[in-house]
Amino acid sequence: MFENALTMRNLSVRTKITCKTLVSAGLIALAVILPQLVHLALGQPGGVKWLPMYLPVLIGGCLLGAKWGLAVGVLSPLVSFLITTAMGNPMPAAPRLPFMMAELAVFALVSGLFTKKIAANGLWAFPAVILAQICGRAAFLLLVAATQSMTQFTPAMIWGQIKTGFVGLAVQAVLVPVIIIALRKLLIKDNADA
């Protein structure tokens, strides 16, 4: 969707890459800051319930497409881990990090596959987000099931966390598409004015 808006403005490839890099960096920063705010206000249970890092990753996928969204999905938990480790409280915790990187990569990749459809009709953001959520959470659960003999996680533990996070997923299934539809209208309006 963002690519279409940049192309309609006849921007150079270099300028497009700069714009997408800046938007990606902003989304990664948001993915680091939002969990900190939620944990500060609601504690760790708030993070498990509201899943704040997922919001910018889903926006990144829908807005930037599969490739750039994938980068946002992989880098968000990694950057958060590196920054929060330096502060003395790693989030996500080291054992969870590879699973979250894989899960959020799937979130961004799946939602990013819909970006052209979203550019044509913003309502496509709803199935994009819901399918991304289902695939991402399933990927996490399957990875844990496949590696449970080597990790501290069990499928039952992760399934319990998935059920706890259903509220956050439900809110994001509505909130992210509304944000994407608003951004789409803004980008189309800006392109019409250009």
Image (spheres, grey):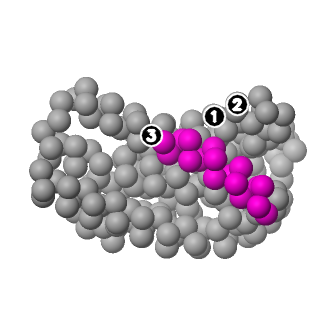
Q: Residue at x 15, y 44 (%)?
A: 9
| Image x and y of residue 182, in percent | 34, 66
Q: Position of residue 35 (x, y in %)?
A: 68, 52
| Depicted 186 relative to depicted 9: above or below | below
What segment is highlighted magenta in the picture?
26-42
Q: Is residue 105 magenta?
A: no
Cβ–Cβ under 8 Å for marks 3 and 2: no
CA separation, marks 3 and 1? 12 Å
Q: Are marks 3 and 1 in contact (CB under 8 Å)?
A: no
Residue at the spot of label 1: 79
Query: What amino acid is at disc 2?
Result: Leu
Q: Secondary structure at mark 2?
A: helix
Label 3 sits on a secondary structure element that is helix
Magenta span has 39?
yes
Label 1: state its secondary structure.
helix
Q: Nearer the viewer, residue 150 or 110?
A: 110
Left or right: 84 with respect to 124? right
**Can you identify the residue that label 2 sits on?**
82
Identify the residue at horizontal 52%, vertical 52% (top origin).
Answer: 56
